[in-house]
Image (tube, rainbow, N blue to C red):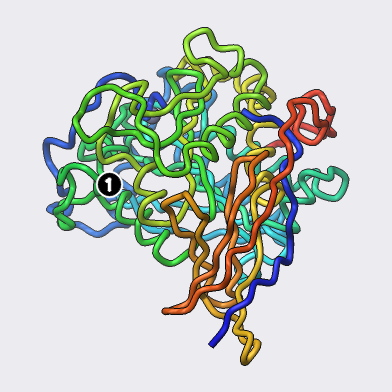
């Protein structure tokens, strides 16, 4: 059997080179109660009781922010309003039975296509609510503008964008970092260096939901949204010896590139005095263990960033439109980078012409990207300005190396510049 590549899309980089919340500096390992399933009444009753308490907290710092019921209504309203380019689904429930709603945006939502999928996850930490607000803005903005804005259209037509506005609705309700069991969800994933979360029965339902989601669906890249700092954080988040050090993963260049897309498209993230270029290696900032980002890269084939999008975790709600404007081009450009950059193609058998769900490696980078099951399509982000030798694999067979030169980087390309002046559109109302 022989294999061959079909590069359906070879668009290369035309632009620039170059977490707190992963949470702020307390990297607490999971502790405390690990299982909330002892409550005996049904999910619906539990949820009702939970919501009833909500009014008691209505006068706090969350004034002007969506409650969990507001968020659910906004997601469903979005689904009705933008039904031609979206699908709403839930990946599971929180400890207190709140559905973890996801918005998928695509011209063929729910259908398998030879296209990459990107995900945004907000509100991992309950007390970092800006992300969940901005992600609803993002969905609505794309819906309102994809007919007239080229970047929005590119996303709708070429990417399956999945948005989980809140991974931790219980923590949000309780106005705290952890979930209802007071577990930090960004320390609850299996860790590559330490067996901190190896007991599968102890894992939180929100974490399990995300892990199952990634088993079912292949994402090429993603970002989770946090608050408490202003920086784009990339792997690794932890070090083998627990020391604070720059700890590079095999795709360090590519991750620096991705993080720079976010920071340079942002209003002022790249101007940071604390973080050169507005980006940081996670372990260099402060090591954490059991984080979602590294697990995505190691176990789900997904290049994930951890984005700290506002210094203030709970800014006054009237600042949200400004924060949306500050982050809008970053969110759009990061998602769009998935098809504007890297190598993309499909793997076929040269004997039968059938697609083969094999994998792709790059000489010199110890990382394998799997092709999709149905179409055998692969989507591999890569840093620009380099010559790469690409090799396809299926079972014991592999292709000859194919060499590709990725485009030069430039900060000046209009493609990603926030000064390009994308249509602003009307502010979304929901
Ligand atoms: Zn956080």
Residue 293 left/right relative to 329: left
Q: Is residue 29 above or below residue 352?
A: above
- Figure quadrant of residue 125: top left
Q: Point out residue 113 in the picture as x, y percentages from the top left corner.
A: 65, 70
In this rendering, the answer to whether 102 lies above or below 242 is below
Q: Which residue is drawn at 34% across and 33% down?
A: 237
Assess disc 1: are there few (<14), some (14-19) or many (≥20) residues with their C-alpha within 10 Å of its C-alpha: many
Looking at the image, residue 85 sits to the left or right of residue 260; the answer is right
- Helix, strand or loop at mark 1: loop
Name the quadrant where ligand 1 sits: top left
Task: Count up the numbered dots.
Answer: 1
The spot of residue 82 in percent (x, y) is: 72, 55
Q: Which residue lies furthest to the bottom in this view?
A: 352
Quadrant of the frame with the C terminus: top right
Residue, far right: 148
Nearest to the observer: residue 42 or residue 360:
360
Tell whether 10 sits left or right of 241: right
The residue at which mark 1 appears reads as: 189
Residue 300 visible from this viewpoint: yes
- Coordinates of residue 227 in the picture (x, y in percent): 45, 24
Instruction: Say whether residue 56 is visible.
Output: no
Name the one closer to the observer, 108 or 388. Answer: 388
Residue shown at 58% from the left, 60% from the top: 390
């Amino acid at each position: 059997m022989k294999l061959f590549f079909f590069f359906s899309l070879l668009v290369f980089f035309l632009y620039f080179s170059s977490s707190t919340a992963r949470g702020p500096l307390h990297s607490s390992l999971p502790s405390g109660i690990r299982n909330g399933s002892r409550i005996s009444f049904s999910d619906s009753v539990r949820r009702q009781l939970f919501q009833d308490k909500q009014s008691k907290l209505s006068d706090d710092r969350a004034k002007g922010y969506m409650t969990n019921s507001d968020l659910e209504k906004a997601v469903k309203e979005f689904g009705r309003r933008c039904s031609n380019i979206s699908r709403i689904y839930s990946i599971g429930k929180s400890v207190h039975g709140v559905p973890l709603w996801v918005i998928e945006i695509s011209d063929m939502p729910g259908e398998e296509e030879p296209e990459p999928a990107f995900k945004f996850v907000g509100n991992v930490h309950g007390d970092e609510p800006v992300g969940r607000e901005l992600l609803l803005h993002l969905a609505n903005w794309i819906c309102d503008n994809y007919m007239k804005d080229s970047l929005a259209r590119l996303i709708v037509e070429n990417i399956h964008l999945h948005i989980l506005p809140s991974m931790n609705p219980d923590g949000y309700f309780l106005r705290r970092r952890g979930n209802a069991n007071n577990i930090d969800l960004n320390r609850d994933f299996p860790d590559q260096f330490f067996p901190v979360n190896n007991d599968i029965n102890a894992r939180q339902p929100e974490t399990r939901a995300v892990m199952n989601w990634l088993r079912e669906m292949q994402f090429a890249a993603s970002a989770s949204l946090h608050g408490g700092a202003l920086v784009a954080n990339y792997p690794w988040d932890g070090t083998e010896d627990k020391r604070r050090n720059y700890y590079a993963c095999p795709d360090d260049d590519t991750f620096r590139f991705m993080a720079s897309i976010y920071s340079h498209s942002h209003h002022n993230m790249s101007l940071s005095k604390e973080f050169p270029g507005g980006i940081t290696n996670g372990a260099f900032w402060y090591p954490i263990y059991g984080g979602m980002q590294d697990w995505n890269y190691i176990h789900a084939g997904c290049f994930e960033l951890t984005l700290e999008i506002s210094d203030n975790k709970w800014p006054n709600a009237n600042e949200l439109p400004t924060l949306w404007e500050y982050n809008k081009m970053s969110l759009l450009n990061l998602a769009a980078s998935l098809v504007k950059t890297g190598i993309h193609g499909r793997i076929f058998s040269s004997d039968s012409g059938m697609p083969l769900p094999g994998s792709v490696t790059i000489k010199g980078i110890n990382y394998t990207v799997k092709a999709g099951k149905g179409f055998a399509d692969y989507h591999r982000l890569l840093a620009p300005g380099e010559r790469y030798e690409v090799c396809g694999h299926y079972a014991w067979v592999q292709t000859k190396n194919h060499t590709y030169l990725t485009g030069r980087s430039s900060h000046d390309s209009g493609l990603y510049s926030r000064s390009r002046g994308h249509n602003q559109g009307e502010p979304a109302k929901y």
